[in-house]
Image (cartoon, helix red, strand yellow):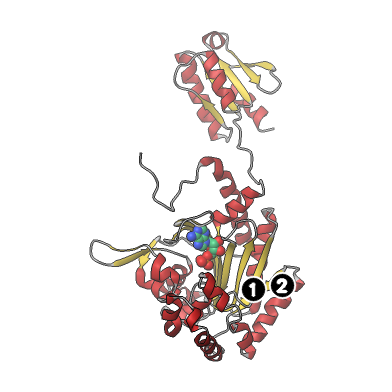
Amino acid sequence: MMQTIRGFRDILPKHISLWQRVEKEAIRLFEAFGFKEIRIPILEKTQLFARSIGEVTDIVEKEMYTFADRKGDKLTLRPEATASIVRSYIQHKMYATDPIRKFYMIGPMFRRERPQKGRYRQFYQIDAEILGVESAYVDSQLIFLLNELFKRLGLTGLSAHINSLGCPECRPSFQEALLGFIESKKDKLCKNCIRRMDKNPLRILDCKVTDCKDALADAPATLDHLCPACEDHFNTVKKTLEKQKVDFIVDKSLVRGLDYYTRTAWEIQTTTLGAQSAVAGGGRYDGLVKELGGPQTPAIGFAIGFDRLVEVMEQLNEIPVEKSLDLFIVSLGDAAMEKGYHWSCELNQLGIRTEMDFRGKSMKALMKRANKLSAQYVLIAGENELMENTIILRDMNTKEQVSLALETLVPELIKIFKK
Ligand code: AMP
C-alpha cells in the first residue's frame, strides 16, 4: 500500500470546514486592515533562504529540503514565506512606486524536523508582512490583529510573549556580554553550541538541549542592552498594547530561530499542545530588504502555524457539524434519471446542495443513501409520477410529503430552499 511520506499528511474533508473557517476569518481581517494577497513560488534558489534566515540556523543547517535540479541549480522547498516576499518586493521594484506594502499569504512550508503532534514536515502558515513602516504602531497593530483573529475564532488560553532583540546599534554590547557569559558555561554546552559560539552566538540561546537551556537560564538578554531608540520603540509597543487591552508577557528569553529579526519579536503560545506551544510567531526585520539587495526598508511580519491553530480549535471542541445535503433526488427508471440529472445541475447552479445516484438502484437503496447523506428533503421521481406530471417531495425530518407540479418544480424548490 502506498503511504504518505513521514511528516507529510492528508487533510481530509471532515477536517476541512475548520481550515476554511480560519481562512475566511483571516482573509476578512487582513482585507479590513489593508493587506493584499500575494502568492509566491514553493521553490526558490537555496541562496535566498541561506542569506535571509542565516547560514548558522537550525532551518538552514539541517531542516531544508534542498536538491539540485537537472541543471545542477541548488533549489529549496520554501521553509517560510518572509524571504520570498522580500525577494518579490525587490524583484518587482515595488519600493519604487510605493514603498509601503502590506501582504498576506496562506500556504504550505517545508522543514525536515522530527515529526510529532503539532510538528510536520509539510505544514501550513498564514503569513502577514508590512514593508516600509518603521513606526512601533505597526508592531502593536500586528499583535492586535493576531489577538483579534484568535478572539474571533473563539480561542482561549493563549498568551503573547514579546521581546526586543535590538538593532545593529545595540548588538555589539550585547554580543560582548553574551560571549563572556557563554565562555563561563562552555563546559556545560553541547557540541553544536560550541561550534556556534564564534559563528552565531545568538543562536545558542535557542538551543533545545535541556542541559544547554539550564546552563543558559541566566544568560544576558538583548532587552538589557537596548539603545535609546530601541528602548523607545519597545516602550511604545507595550504602551499601545496596554491601551488596547491586549494581554502580553515580556519574555527576555524569546529569541526566535531566524537571524533576520531586529527589535520587536513575539510568539503567541498555547498551553494545550504540549511541547509545540507556539501557535504564531513574528518580528521586525529592518535589515533584510537591504541585505537581499533592495533599498533600506524597515519591515515586520508574522506567521501563524495553521496546523497548530486548527489542532487547538479541535481541542476546544470547535468541530463544526458537517453540512448536510438540501435535497436528494430518488430517480427510478431511465426517464427519471435523465430528468433528475438536469434538475440536480440546475439546483446546484443555484447553490442548493443536491445529490442523486446514477447506479439505477432500488427505491429502498436510494432512500438509504439519502439518509446516509443526511438529506433534508427527498424528491421521489418514478415513472408513474412523471406520467402524471407530479412529483413527491418528502421532508425527511417531519416525514411530511407534498406533491409538486412538474412544470413548476424548480421554481417551487427554489422557494423552499431559498427561504
Ligand atoms: P517560524 O516561521 O519558525 O517563526 O514559525 C511560525 C509558526 O509556524 C510557529 O509558531 C508554528 O506555529 C508554525 N510552525 C513552525 N514549524 C512548524 C512545523 N514543523 N509544523 C507545524 N507548524 C510549524
* Residue 110 coordinates in the image, percent (x, y): 43, 60
User: In the picture shown, does residue 308 fall above or below 283?
Assistant: above
Q: Do labels 1 and 2 touch, CB within 8 Å?
A: yes
Farthest residue toward the left? 71
Q: Nearer the viewer, mark 1 or mark 2?
A: 1
Circle on res. 162: 1
| Image position of 55 (left or right of 153) | left
Residue 100, located in which quarter of the rendered image?
bottom right
* Along the viewing direction, whichever of 81 and 123 lies nearer the viewer: 123
Q: Is mark 2 on a helix, strand or loop?
A: helix
The image quadrant of residue 230 is bottom right
Work out whether mark 1 precedes mark 2 in sequence or the reverse, and give the earlier one: 1
Is the residue marked by circle 2 packed among few (<14), some (14-19), or many (20+) residues within 10 Å?
Answer: some
Query: Where does label 2 land, which residue?
Result: 241
**Residue depicted at 63% across the width and 51% down the height:** 313
Q: What residue type is labelled 2?
A: Leu
Q: Residue 16 location, x and y as percent?
A: 55, 45
Measure the alpha-carbon separation of dots 1 and 2: 11 Å
Q: Can residue 105 be seen in this view?
A: no
Amino acid type, callout 1: Ile
For the point 45% across and 14% down, the residue is 334
